[in-house]
Amino acid sequence: MNSGRGNIQIKFEFSEEDFTQVSEYAARMYGLNIPESKRDLIYARISRQMRSVGASSFDSYFTEIQKKESSFESRKFLSLLTTNVTSFFREPHHFDSLKRVLRDRLEKPSRKDRFTIWSAGCSSGQEAFSIASVVHEVNSKFADSSVKVLATDVDDEVLKRARLGTYNDVEVADLNEVSRRSLFESYSPNASEYQILPNLLNLVEFKNLNLVKPWGLADKFDVIFCRNVVIYFDRETQQVLWKRFFDQMNAEGTLFLGQSERISGGCSSHFESVGFTEYRKIV
Ligand SMILES: C[S@@+](CC[C@H](N)C(=O)[O-])C[C@H]1O[C@@H](n2cnc3c(N)ncnc32)[C@H](O)[C@@H]1O
């Protein structure tokens, strides 16, 4: 690849066939369904990245991308394909349910095993830290040792941000003061940067995990948040995922989905609906 200097205005040829190649690659590697309506958006993102690395044509750039999934440029490319929109306490009713589920568990002192929560498709960490804040609120001692929060995403760029736990004023703008204090250290109303409290940061383990590849997870989970992720997958991939989530959950575990996502098909009988986009594993 050449130096990108001076190429700022270059427009790359990006044919129908090129778009098909990208969408097939996205589906094969990451389960992502990229509709034709996103073609211009994808072109804009890819061409910006091609200019920044000085690529001469889409063909040569995409050949490099496909050589090695784990290469720096392939990871960057994946980032161009994903949608990472998220926020703290998004779909807040799920966090009320989480509080209830956690309290129920605390009332059963006979259960000595760790309570395990998985934020699958965690983006830049807002969902995982909202979970951690609820855990802490329910019982701060509980948070120290007997709860594990795993947060995973396939996109290294967002995971890098999540691990830092630093957010800007726009990202916290919709939070009320109580929520801000529950999440951030040295809260000041007019700050431009907010740092997640160390006890919440320590509670969450962030990890790269591709939901459509083998997971290699030793734990089974009491609660799985997989919200606004499967909406980007095709139906077949969703069906496979429901079964895999079922297998990865403890008895009576809870699965939270995003507001436009539903369990359907053969796996419906494995889960009962216990709230809005909230499911319990049937044993
Ligand atoms: C729209 S965000 C949702 C974030 C959060 N769950 C929420 O509801 O606010 C979707 C996330 O799913 C991730 N994702 C997409 N495909 C994935 C895959 N195959 N495996 C794991 N994560 C994936 C994306 O990188 C992105 O960060």
Image (cartoon, grey):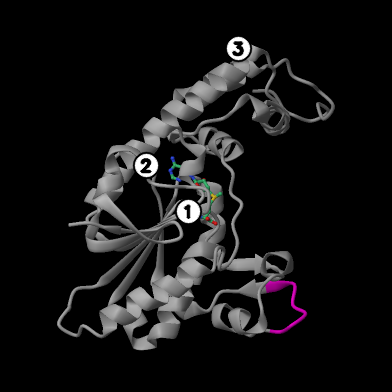
Q: Distance between the residues labelled 3 and 2?
A: 33 Å
Nearer the observer: mark 3 or 2; the answer is: 2
Nearer the observer: mark 3 or 1; the answer is: 1
Q: Name the residue under label 3.
A: 17
Question: Most prominent secondary structure in the magenta stretch?
Answer: loop
Residue span colored magenta: 188-193
Please state, as top left, top right, bottom left or bottom right, where the N terminus lies in the image.
top right
Q: Mark 1 points at which residue?
A: 227
Question: The disc labelled 2 sits on which kind of residue?
Answer: Ser
> Under 8 Å from ligand 1: the CB of mark 3?
no
Q: Do the residues labelled 3 and 1 touch (CB within 8 Å)?
A: no
Question: The disc labelled 1 sits on which kind of residue?
Answer: Arg
User: Could you say whether the residue bearing mark 1 is in a helix, strand or loop?
Assistant: loop
The image shows residue 179 at horizontal and vertical percentages of 59, 79
Q: Name the residue under label 2.
A: 264
Nearer the observer: mark 2 or 1; the answer is: 2
Magenta stretch contains residue 1:
no
CA neighbours of label 2 inside 10 A, class few (<14), some (14 to 19), many (20+): few
Find residue 39 and report its image quarter.
Answer: top right
Q: Residue at x 73, y 69 (%)?
A: 169
Q: Do the residues labelled 3 and 2 touch (CB within 8 Å)?
A: no
The image shows residue 208 at horizontal and vertical percentages of 41, 49
51 or 221: which is nearer to us?
221
Q: Residue at x 65, y 18 (%)?
A: 58
